[in-house]
Each structure stands twice: as structure tokens, then as C-alpha cells.
Amino acid sequence: MAISVSISHITPITLFYLLLLLLLSSTTTTSALNITSILSSFQNLTSFSSLLCSTSVAPDLTRRDPVTLLAVPNSYLSTSPSSDLTHRLPPSSLGDILRYHVLLQYFSWSDLRQIPPSGVLVTTLLQTTGRVHSNFGAVNITRDPLTNSITIQSPAPFSPSNVTVLSLIKTLPYNITILAVDSLLVPYDFNLLASETRPPLGLNITKALIDGHNFNVAASMLAASGVVDEFEADEGGAGITLFVPTDDAFGDLPGNVKLQSLPADKKAVVLKFHVLHSYYPLGSLESIVNPVQPTLATEDNGAGSFTLNISRVNGSVAIDTGIVQASVTQTVFDQNPVAIFGVSKVLLPRGIFGKDSAGVTSKPGNAVVGTTVQPPETSPSPENSAGFSGPASHLSSPPGFREEITSKGGRYRMQSCIVTLCCIGLVLVV
């Protein structure tokens, strides 16, 4: 006897929502990468993970995607020459060496198999800091056609430091790959002697500003807010760069900008918006590779927020917030790992002082006059590296290797499908 099932009671709207729920249940979302969480499942990488945290490099990785991380296993990190570097160098210098291990390009195992013997040049996180000469912040990856071994070293001729890829640790296509290498990689022309002998700074930032004679308002605000203690604590890590408005800059604030009326938490955000969590001397700012720079306020409010656009305009360093464009007027203090620069205007973050924000009192015809500017022309981001092609090799995949399919492209296509289904749903409702 045939059995029939009636589905006449299933309306188009019900069917639409069933399809939408099915689609959402099959969608895998990826949040900001927590590199230390990923590394924590590998017991042979605990020392390397600790170094990333102690040098403040780990937070930088959460804002980078895609990356390939060159991780040194415990057994290799505890032997010379890697152990010599970890014991002798201060955190700021060791942090730059670790940034040299962050390649700003995703490499799958199959990508590595296709690297030509001549090699490919890849930008690292160190290159974006502007603290290296020429392209010495990049690495050259080569493949031996006979043994299929992968070697990574500086692009400089006769570079004394190089590492060999031992194995693939983990990959999340197309976001991150972690490769095990046999040593720490030192950038060419990296001054190990200067880093080793540099004494701890312990700068009193408020006193340095008062001694500058034209930064009394900023010094008072920093002392009253308490954030200066946080700034000084960061001196021992990757260093800091402060952009401090002059007293005249505070006096030139438009009447509708109520900086002093902000609640304490928002005032602290504004102050942190003037600080980069890395040491940049003036020469590095003038030749900065990645113009969009996160600030200390970015770390508190999420990736992509409260960033500064730094570029060279008419021979000077320009800082664009999206609302105002200031220029560096003087060097107040510059000794690694702290740089303090005077700037011509108060850096107003768009998230607080933008249109309809609490930091601006709107009146007819009373806009923030004379401060809105077009963003300066920016250079291409170093992450947009050219691809490569080459003959396939016979390099075998590591034992137990299994790629986890969570690609960005798949997420974007899934989002498009969801939008399409929503549009269909609206049509059915109408």
C-alpha cells in the first residue's frame, strides 16, 4: 500500500525559514585569531608561545590575517644560538625578531611544494614597523629541488642567519599556517650588540612633557587620568610612540568639541588614541610601510577601530584621524624604546567626535571648522604581496596532516547566500 505524506500545510514562508536555519547551522564562523590559544594545544611550542606574550607580539597577530607563523619548538629554542638570543636581548629587541617570524601571506603545504628553486620574497610583520632598512624586513623562501627542503633567510646576499622548515604544525585555510623551524631567524643588519647593551629606560613621561615647556595641558591630563602609568609599563615591551598635542593645539580646539566634559573612560580612550604600541623613531615614521596603524585605544575597543593614518606629506609626517590632520612639529624625546613627538593638533577619534557623537555639541553652522581634511594618499599595504607559481615538487605532506576547511572565500559566498535568501523571504512576505 502506498503511503502519501501531505505537505500542503508547509507554506513558502515556512520553507524559507527552514532553508535559512539549515544554511546557518552549516556555516562556520571564524573570530579574530587567538594565536596563543592555537599554540596552547602543542606542548612542544609552549616556550615560543610564552615569548610571543612576553614581548607583546601576540596581540599584533590577532589583527593580522592571513599569516604564516614560523614557530621554534622547545628543543630548538633551548639550544644555541636561539637560547643566546632569548637570554641576552631585551623584550623590545626580541619582539622585533619574533615579528620577523610572522609572514604576511598564507602558505598551505601545497603552496610550499610549488615554491620555485629561485625562491619567493615575502613581507614580514617586522617590515611594517619601519625599523629596518630597505627590504631587510622581508624573507626569501627557497626550495631545494633535490631534497625538497624549504629554507628561509634574509634577502640580503650572504646572510648568516637561515632556518629550515621542519614540519607543518597547523593550518586554517586561508587564514593562518604554523610551521616548525629549527632556529630563531635574525634579520640582516640587526644590531644585536646595541640591543644587548641598552639599559632599561624607565622614563617618567609626565616629567619629560613638563621639561618640554609646551605640553603642560597634555601632562596634566595624562597625570589626572592615570593612563600614563599604563604607558610607562609598556616601555619594557615593544616600546611606545606618543603624539602629544602642544598647549596651543588644545587652545585651538573648536568650541563644539567638549574634550574636558567627556566621562573619564572616554577621555582615557582619547589619550590612548595618541599612542602607538611600538617604538618608532622619526625616520621610521617618515618611511612607514603600512600607513594605517593601530593605537592603544584599538587594543581596548577592537581591531579596525581607533586607528591612525600616518604618511609623509610635504616633507613632514602627517597624522590623519578621519576628522583632523595633524603634523609632527618636534621631537620631544627619542630613545629606544620610547619616542615622544609634539603634534600640531589634538587627535580627535572619529568614534567619539564624529557626527552625532557625544564628544561634539552640534549647533547650526557650527561644525568642526578647518579640521576636516581629505585622507592622505596611502601606499599599498605590504600584505598585498604578489603570488607565485612554480613547478610542483614531490614534497610529501607531513604524517597526520589534515587541512581544516574554513576559508574566507567560503564565508563570503555563504554570506551572499544568506542575503539572497533574505531577499526571497521579503518577496514571499509581500
Image (cartoon, rainbow, N blue to C red):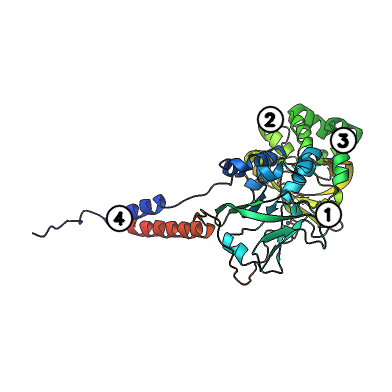
Q: Is residue 251 above or below residue 379?
A: above
Q: Which residue is mark 3?
A: 199
Please state which of the two labelled residues, at mark 3 or mark 1, is closer to the viewer.
3
Percent x, y of residue 349: 70, 44
Quadrant assignment for the N terminus: bottom left
* Circle 3: element type: loop
The residue where tag 1 is placed is 286
191 sits to left or right of 181 = right
Residue in front for this viewpoint, 28 or 111 = 111
Q: Which residue is identified by label 2?
A: 264
The alpha-carbon separation of the residues under discs 3 and 1 comes to 26 Å
Q: Amino acid at mark 1?
A: Glu
Residue 299 vertical position relative to residue 224 in the rendered view, above or below:
below
As measured in the structure, the alpha-carbon distance from the residue carrying label 4 to the one carrying label 2 is 51 Å
Crowd tier of the residue under label 4, counting other residues whose Cα lies within 10 Å: few below 14, some 14–19, many 20 or above: few
Q: Nearer the viewer, mark 3 or mark 4?
A: 3
Residue under the image location 67 percent in, 38 percent down? 50
Query: Which is more foreground, mark 2 or mark 1?
Result: 1
- Name the N-terminal-most of marks 2 and 3: 3
Q: CA distance from mark 2 to mark 3?
A: 35 Å
Looking at the rendered structure, the kind of residue marked 4 is Leu
Q: Which amino acid lies under the numbered mark 2 shown in the image of this protein?
A: Ala
**For the residues marked 4 and 1, what is the alpha-carbon distance in whole angstroms?**
59 Å
Q: Which image quadrant: the C terminus?
A: bottom left
Residue 27, position as x, y percentages in the image: 44, 52
- At label 3, which amino acid type do we have? Pro
Q: Mark 2 and 3 residues: CB-CB less than 8 Å, in contact? A: no
Crowdedness near tag 3: few (<14), some (14–19) or many (≥20) residues, C-alpha within 10 Å:
few
